[in-house]
Image (cartoon, rainbow, N blue to C red):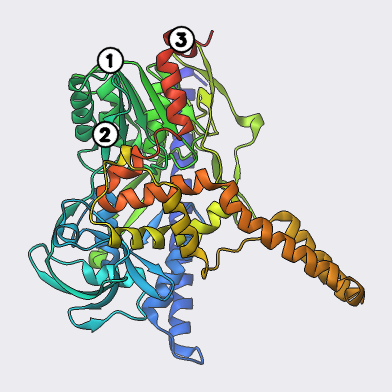
């Protein structure tokens, strides 16, 4: 057979195989849709109890998508507004977060500059009625839905302010746009700091403006904080990288099953500053777009990454509009940063007992930054300097989780009309004694590991009928633990005071307080300052030598 005939024969076989594959796929889809339709119809017609067709279908859709990955989701018409907020950071409402607090629903945080804050609502205010209707029994999500609405419409809230009594507020809803950069400011005379919490529209512009403003204030170094930032729009991640790197630089490429999802994203604009020393802070809550930014800065040796290993989400989602005003978010591609690595940590095609497994070490590859520093794929972004914040002690964690720090801050705010600037605000010994008095009738108990072992011993003593002989010893030990826990308030006084100062200051200065009151104790920030104070160490980190 001639060379030409062989080629034609090979192409024909290839087309034939592809055709069979497409037919097989179509047949499988068609067959399973028919089976599902038959089951769905039979359940609705014949099941012994009444079923709700819509609920049944939603359960089936959610279960199907759950088998893929956590990021592929279906949104009903009623959920469309929540999804729009996730993507845009914008919604119509009063500009406040509400949360469940025991049996009550309370204002958790009003956004500065929006209706709730403007009319005087405060963190800790207990919600009683909305437009004359009691809210008791509602979840925070249900109440949030009631508070949202078209900008310009009016809503009347009845609240109870602890130690002040019942009050009524009339608010006009507004279009609320949550800032991507809730705070930027100076840490020292020459170090600027930017906190980024989202990647919704204009995130790049907000970072651009923040860097320009900080430079005007004298910043010669920048700390860029991406800790706890779960990501968002991919093109905003590109815009943010563009603030610090030249125009035309490759930032990220995506590859999917369909060719239309294979794309390359480069910077398009003139940067603000490509030379200013930069430290990017990350942690386990930094994901997706945050990892594109931090990973690209690392791959290009543009700055030093400090903190703890990031989450490891290297998947890209696209939105699909469906029938009846429903929509879905579906994973369509994986993304790759300039070195060529994909930072995806979990393999959702490889599950054990329903849980995705981490990508095996044997499958991970080594890539290299511009200056030939080795970086690894399949495990998120590993910082150049590992630091991380210290964990809370057990007593501090108990005071936070039981909302006792929150409640004392509410009381303090209602008793004090003003405080000094957040970076100057400090509680003294008398304030701390007041806090301890406040705790006297509160439950802030917690179990140490030794106490847990004691409880286990008590259980075994009962099972083996030794409890009578040991009861007094066990009671004495319990009393001793109780004394030690009371002493913990004094032992960990500094830590508890820091938590109180931040929570109290936030009642007066909002997002600004959450940042400025923690600079001195923030080990990641202090590491960044040390790097800036040692330029040779900073450069050595970037060169990997």
**Disc 3 crowd, CA 10 A, few/some/many (<14, 14-19, 20+):** few
Q: Earlier in the sequence, mark 1 or mark 3?
A: 1
Q: Report the residue at 51% width, 68% height from top.
A: 442
Separation (CA) of disc 1 from disc 3:
16 Å
Q: Which mark is residue 274?
A: 1
Q: Nearer the viewer, mark 3 or mark 2?
A: 2
Q: Is residue 31 left or right of residue 472?
A: left
Q: Judge whether residue 28 can be spotted in this image.
A: no
Q: Is residue 175 above or below residue 166?
A: above
Q: Report the residue at 45% width, 58% height from top.
A: 435
Q: Report the residue at 34% width, 81% height from top.
A: 136
Q: Which mark is residue 371?
A: 3
The answer to whether the residue labelled 1 contacts the one labelled 3, judged by CB atoms less than 8 Å apart, is no
Which residue is farthest left?
152
Q: Report the residue at 35% width, 29% height from top.
A: 224
The residue labelled by disc 2 is 184
**Disc 2 crowd, CA 10 A, few/some/many (<14, 14-19, 20+):** many
């Amino acid at each position: 057979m001639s060379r030409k005939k062989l080629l034609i024969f090979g192409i024909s076989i290839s087309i034939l195989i592809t055709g069979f594959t497409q037919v097989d796929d179509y047949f499988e889809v068609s067959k399973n849709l028919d089976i599902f339709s038959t089951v769905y119809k039979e359940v609705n017609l014949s099941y012994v109890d009444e079923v709700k067709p819509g609920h049944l279908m939603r359960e089936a859709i959610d279960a199907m998508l759950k088998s893929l990955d956590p990021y592929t989701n279906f949104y009903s018409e009623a959920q469309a507004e929540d999804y729009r907020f996730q993507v845009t950071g914008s919604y119509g409402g009063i500009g406040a977060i509400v949360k469940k607090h025991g049996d009550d629903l309370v204002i958790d945080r009003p956004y500065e500059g929006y209706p709730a804050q403007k009319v005087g609502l405060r963190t800790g205010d207990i919600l009683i009625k909305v437009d004359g209707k009691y809210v008791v029994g509602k979840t925070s999500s249900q109440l949030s839905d009631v508070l949202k609405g078209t900008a310009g419409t009016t809503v009347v809230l009845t609240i109870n302010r602890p130690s002040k009594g019942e009050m009524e507020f009339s608010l006009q809803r507004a279009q609320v746009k949550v800032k991507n950069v809730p705070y930027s400011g100076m840490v020292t005379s020459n170090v600027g700091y930017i906190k980024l919490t989202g990647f919704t529209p204009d995130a790049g512009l907000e970072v651009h403006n923040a860097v320009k403003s900080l430079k005007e204030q004298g910043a010669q170094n920048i700390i860029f904080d991406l800790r706890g930032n779960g990501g968002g729009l991919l093109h905003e991640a590109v815009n943010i990288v563009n603030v610090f790197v030249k125009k035309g630089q490759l930032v990220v490429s995506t590859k999917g099953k369909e060719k239309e999802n294979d794309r390359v994203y480069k910077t398009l604009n003139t940067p603000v500053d490509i030379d200013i020393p930069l430290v990017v802070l990350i942690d386990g809550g930094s994901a997706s777009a945050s990892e594109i930014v931090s990973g690209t800065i690392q791959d290009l040796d543009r700055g030093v990454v400090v903190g703890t290993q990031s989450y490891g989400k290297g998947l890209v989602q696209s939105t699909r509009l469906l029938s009846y005003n429903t929509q879905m978010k579906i994973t369509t591609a994986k993304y790759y940063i300039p070195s060529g690595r994909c930072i995806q940590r979990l393999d959702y095609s490889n599950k054990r007992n329903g849980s995705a497994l981490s990508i095996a070490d044997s499958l991970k590859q080594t890539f290299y930054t511009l200056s030939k520093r080795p970086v690894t794929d399949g495990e998120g972004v590993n910082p150049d300097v590992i630091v991380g914040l210290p964990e809370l002690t057990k007593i501090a964690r108990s005071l936070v989780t039981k909302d006792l720090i929150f409640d004392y801050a509410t009381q303090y705010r209602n008793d004090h009309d003003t405080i000094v600037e957040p970076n100057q605000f400090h509680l003294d010994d008398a304030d701390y004694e007041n806090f301890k008095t406040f705790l006297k009738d509160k439950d802030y108990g917690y179990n140490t590991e030794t106490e847990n072992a004691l409880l286990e011993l008590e259980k075994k003593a009962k099972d083996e009928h030794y409890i009578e002989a040991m009861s007094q010893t066990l009671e004495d030990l319990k009393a001793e633990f109780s004394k030690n826990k009371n002493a913990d308030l004094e032992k960990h006084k500094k830590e508890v005071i820091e938590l109180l100062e931040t929570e109290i200051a936030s009642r007066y200065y909002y997002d600004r307080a959450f940042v400025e009151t923690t600079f001195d104790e923030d080990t990641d920030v202090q590491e960044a300052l040390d790097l800036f104070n040692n330029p040779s160490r900073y450069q050595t980190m970037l060169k990997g030598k």
